[in-house]
Amino acid sequence: MFRRSVLNLHLYIGLILSVTILMLSVTGFYLNHQHGWFHKQNVHYLHPDYDEIAENANNLAKQGEKTVPEAVEIATASELFSISDIMSVNYASHGLGYFYYVHLNDDRGTIVVVTEKGEVAKSYSDSTIKKWMYDLHVGIVDGFKFVFINDITTFGIIFLTISGIILSIRILKSKVKRARKKS
């Protein structure tokens, strides 16, 4: 009786969780390969001289000079960071409007969020465990890439989950048939 109860629990819990496992496997695979396989970024350059501007910025960067947007330069007055601390600057909207995301070159991986007016909206850094978990999820640890191992595991989990669902459905059908024969 106990064995049958455990098997039934395993069957039903496995069926319920299989949807989540399948979703996590597929979305994890997508996240690992989103830029390389699934979609290319659709970039629209607003400035007609973008290529020239980018080339000049790259040449200055090679010479050790950094060019930053005026709003980011204004934000250095907050004394949270200086231009020499900047690793990169991204201009993006994350639902609340456009901001400059200033990535600092420090041990914590600090990001300073700057408004278009040069005001510091917030400053944050992800915890070490969060960075480590993300790196592990996408298949990189200390610069070593093992995405292929994650891919093989993902396909294995997808196969096991789908075959588990099929086997579980067969078991449930046979239980229904047995119950009908008894009655």
Image: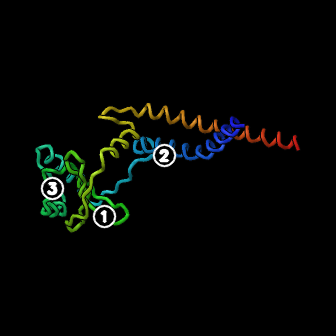
User: Which residue lies at the image location 56% right of the left edge and 38% below the top edge?
Assistant: 158
Helix, strand or loop under label 1: strand
Q: Locate the C terminus and report the quarter of the image it occupies.
A: top right
For label 3, the residue is 81
Q: How is the model colour-coded? A: rainbow
Q: Which of 61 and 31 is in front in this view?
A: 31
User: Which residue lies at the image location 77% right of the left edge and 41% below the top edge?
Assistant: 173
Q: x, y percentage for residue 81?
A: 15, 56
Left or right of residue 4: residue 138: left
Can you tell which of label 3 and label 2 is closer to the viewer? Answer: 3
Can you tell which of label 1 and label 2 is closer to the viewer? Answer: 2
Crowding at dot 2, Cα within 10 Å, few <14 / some 14-19 / many 20+, comes out as: some
Q: x, y percentage for residue 48?
A: 26, 59
Q: Which of 156 and 181 is in front in this view?
A: 181
Helix, strand or loop under label 2: helix
Q: Which residue lies furthest to the bottom in this view?
A: 117
For label 1, the residue is 98
Which amino acid type corresponds to the residue marked 1 in the rendered image? Tyr
User: Which residue lies at the image location 23% right of the left edge and 55% below the top edge?
Assistant: 102
